[in-house]
Each structure stands twice: as C-alpha cells, then as structure tokens.
Amino acid sequence: MTIKNANDTLNTRMSGIISRVQNEHGMVRMIVILVGAFAFFTVLKPGIFLNPLNLQNIAIASPEIGIIAIAMMIAMLTGGIDLSIVAIANMSAITITTLYSGIVATNPESAAAAMPFIVLLGLVVGLVGGLFNGFLISYLGITPILATLGSMQIFNGLAIVWTGGATLYGAPEALAVLGKSAVAGIPVLFVLFIVAAALVAVIINKTPLGLKVQLQGTNPIAALYSGISPKTVLMGTYAIIGLLAGFAGILFLTRNPTASADYGSSYILLAIVIAVLGGTNPAGGFATVTGVVLATLTLQTVSSGFNAIRLSAYEYSLAQGTILIAVMIIDQITLKRRLRAPLIKQTHTAPQLVGK
C-alpha cells in the first residue's frame, strides 16, 4: 500500500469515527433543545402555546421548509451546497398554477382530470432543474456554490419573465384542500413530510447510491480509488434534490394557492441553518435526516413561541443565529474532547508497556 493510499484510508476511518460521534451527538442535542424550547414556551404562555390550533400550525408550517432543509442536507452531504432549491420550487409552483388556471379558463370540466398530471409535471420541472445543476457540477466541474448561484439566478429570472413579476392565482383547489386535511388530528402535510423524510433516510442509509454519496463526501479521492464514479453520484444526488425542490413547490401551493417568483426568499439561509443544526457536516461526509427533522421542528417551535410572547421576526432571526453559534461552539468543544481522549489514554498507558 502506498503512503497516499494509507493516508486516504486513515482519513476515511477518522471521518467515519467523527461521523458516528457527530450523528449521535447531533440527534441527542436536537432532542434536548426541542424539549427545552417546548417546555420553556409552555411555562411562559401555556394558554397560547398549548392551544391545539397553535400546535397544528407548527405541524403545517414545518413541511415546506423541512423538505428544503433535507434537500440542502443531501447537497451538503457530498461536500457541496445548493442555493437554487427555492428557485426551482417556485418554478414548479408557477408551472402548476399556470397550466391549471389555463385549462380551467378554456375547459373547466377537464381541469380536475388533468390535475394529477399537472402536479406530476411540477415534479418533472424540479427534476430537470436538479439535473441541470448536476450537469454543471459533475460534468463541467463548476464549484457547487457557483453553479447553483448561477442556476438560481437563471430560474429566478425565468420566473419573473414568466409571471411579469406578479403573483399568479388559480392553483388547483385540491391542493388547498389537501393542505387543510388531517388524519387522526395530524395534518396531512406533516404526514407527507415524515414519509418523504423516511424515504430519503432509506435512500441515504440503505441504498448503494446513498452509501456512495456518503463516501464521496467523506473522501472523494478514496471514493474514486474504490471505483465510484463521481459524475454518476453527483448527477443522482442533484436529481434527488431537484425532485425534493419540486415537491416543496407543490407544498407551497397547499398552504398558499398562489405562485410567485419571490415566495420563500428567506428559506435558503434558514435551510442551511436547519441542516447544520441537525448535525450535517458542511464539509460533507455525514448527516442525519432525523436530525434535520428535529431541527426543523425546533425552529418552528421557537418561531411559534416567539409569536406567543409577541416578539418580532427580527428577534427570531437573532435567536436563530444565537442557537446556531452556540451549537457550533458546543460541537467543536465536544469533538476536540472526544478526539483527544484516546491520545491521553495512550499517553498514560505507554510507560506501563515500556515497564513490562
């Protein structure tokens, strides 16, 4: 084995150790923060915060940002990032609204029958957007942040030209009905969110593509020597991200039956915050879907709590930043202690071995 291969193997093993530590720590951390935030606002404003309508609002508001955060997590798992997710989601929502309202205007009887195909086309728009990003990154070698920054501008520009900068009305009524539906008191949107998160978790943890994505993010050189094609992995990764973005566009319409080019303009930064809070390594290699789901619920809980105690959106942004910085500091301290522990143990055991 060459020195280079030995170093790659060592790096991969170290990344694996760090990955396990971060994954376990990330989920426990988010559970503690979520329970703590819930308890804090319950004590402060029990009448408002524990109101069933408020709890239902948390469950309804979480899915669209949660899906975007999961898509961001997948991009970060490969060591990349995707700034175009919201722009793709808006393109999907605009496509659905335009086609459906056009059919309703000309032939209302056939609109309901065509609705499933139109929604499916919204997913296809997301897939095409994701494949475009994958092509730029994997085949042309453009850095993910620059490739998706450029595509975000393209998609936003197309959306503005398409809509003339106006808000489009006329989304399928069935989507609005879906957004208001519940199963056993649980909003259908939240159920769809959990199902989508579970599917992504299975893809990442149980399929060959998911394992390749993790290895690609952990050590791209080792992945290449293992016979993994980075182009195929990245194309598959961004295709999934595009599909999730298309799904997020559909969720936009379930909550708000209008589409516009600037909907969710603040979601990208929030999705990055959620992904990192959920235990995703920004440098790639490890992440947990469960952690991202918990982080989504935590920030929605904090947002709802701030509304209950009548704090402003600016103070909520301040809280987001404070939580993120605090968690990063705790992560760094914990990681250094865990990595230092074996070295200290070796230092203490070495003289005994010499003595024998």
Image (cartoon, rainbow, N blue to C red):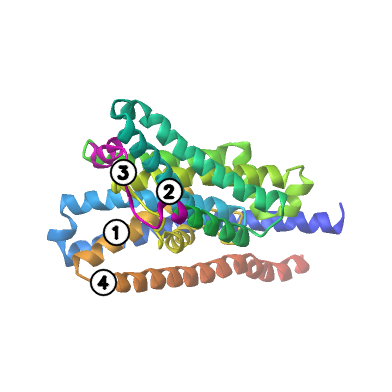
Crowding near pointer 4: few (<14 within 10 Å), some, many (20+)? few
Front of the two marks 2 and 1: 2
Q: Is residue 223 left or right of residue 291?
A: right
Q: Amino acid at mark 4?
A: Ser
Q: Which mark is residue 312?
A: 4
**Which picture quadrant has residue 208?**
top right
Q: Describe the element under mark 4 as helix, strand or loop.
A: loop
Q: Residue at position x 60%, y 67% from top?
A: 341
Q: Position of residue 289 (x, y in %)?
A: 47, 48
Tell me: 276 left or right of 55. right
Asked if residue 209 shows in the view, the reply is yes
Which residue corresponds to mark 2? Answer: 67
- At mark 2, the secondary structure is helix
Q: Earlier in the sequence, mark 3 or mark 1?
A: 3
Which quarter of the figure has residue 300? bottom left
Sequence-earlier tag: 2 or 1: 2
Q: What's drawn in magenta, residue-wise?
A: 160-182
Disc 2 crowd, CA 10 A, few/some/many (<14, 14-19, 20+) = many
Label 1 sits on residue: 301
Q: Position of residue 268 (x, y in %)?
A: 46, 60
Q: Which residue is mark 3?
A: 254
Name the kind of residue labelled 2 in the image: Ile
Q: In the image, what residue type sits under mark 3?
A: Thr
When the figure is inspected, residue 320 is found, relative to residue 196, above or below; the finding is below
Q: CA distance from mark 2 to mark 3?
A: 14 Å
